[in-house]
Amino acid sequence: MSTSGTGRDRMLASIRAGISRQADRRHGEPAPSKPTPLIPARATAPGVDVVGLFRTQLINAKATLDEVASRDDVPAAVARYLANNNFEARVRLSPDARVSSLPWDKAPMVETSSGRSHGNDPTSVTPAVAAVAETGTMVLQSSDGTPTTLHFLPDQHVVVIAKSQIVGTYEDALARVKRGPDGSLPRTVNFVTGPSRSADIGKILLMGAHGPKKLHVIVVDGEL
């Protein structure tokens, strides 16, 4: 038998098997159960330290991390980050109360404004839906208080989260996405792991190819 004939026979046998399974279900036999999603054990093992895992994975993704005791410490942490990296002391804040209501008067050297970005803001400061420990990923959603432009247009993106927002898996994070009053999902949900980078052209690594060159996460040991 020729090679082409063998391949054709296999294809026809597969089609016949599929038709047979459909016929069985029509006659009342249960459909085969769906496979259980494969979730990495590093995020689900008993006693796993999700905060420690997140810290490790975030740093592996070339992002930076700061941890503070309370929300009142966030403005000083932002000022410290800007100064230590010699970045311009000017930030665009998310209108979301978790960021806009922070005591920014405690960082008088930092110039702040609030609203969506139009591409001329060096640094943005936003909240997040959750942080995923298994990959060090930030989960960001669009809303009136969290415009997506703040997540991608500035060169530096500072994300502020509470320690309680760090979860083990993507499934845990998706369960925290906030729906609208009518139950609708947000228009955009982005999963961001580290700063934007690409090596598509000439295999040369370029930072900031599709978004911020730097991602800095401030974890608050308390509520926002």
Image: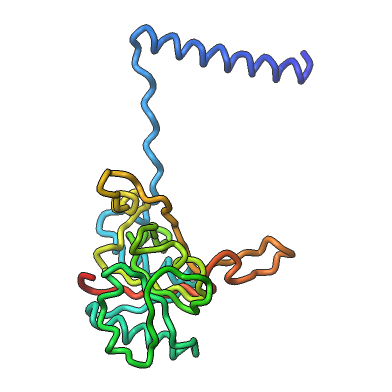
Q: Residue 223, position in %: x, y? A: 21, 70
Image side of residue 4 versus residue 105, left or right: right
Q: Quadrant of residue 163?
A: bottom left
Residue found farthest to the right:
2
Quadrant position of residue 210: bottom right
Percent from the top left, x then y, of residue 98? 27, 70
Figure coloring: rainbow
Total of numbered circles in the picture? Answer: 0
User: As displayed, is residue 70 above or below residue 61?
Assistant: below
Residue sitting at 35 percent across and 60 percent down?
144
Image side of residue 88 versus residue 102, left or right: right
**Quarter of the image that includes the C terminus:** bottom left
Q: Residue at x 38, y 79 (%)?
A: 113
- At which x and y percent is residue 55? 37, 70
Camera-nearest residue between 160 and 39: 160
- Quadrant in the rendering for residue 135: bottom left
- 97 in relation to 77, above or below: above
Is 169 in front, or is 4?
169
Query: For this view, does 213 lie left or right of residue 56?
Result: right
Q: In this view, does 204 lie to the left or right of 164?
A: right
Give the residue at the far bottom of this rendering. Answer: 109
Q: Residue at x 32, y 52 (%)?
A: 177
For the N terminus, give its image quadrant: top right
Q: Nearer the viewer, residue 113 or 61?
A: 113
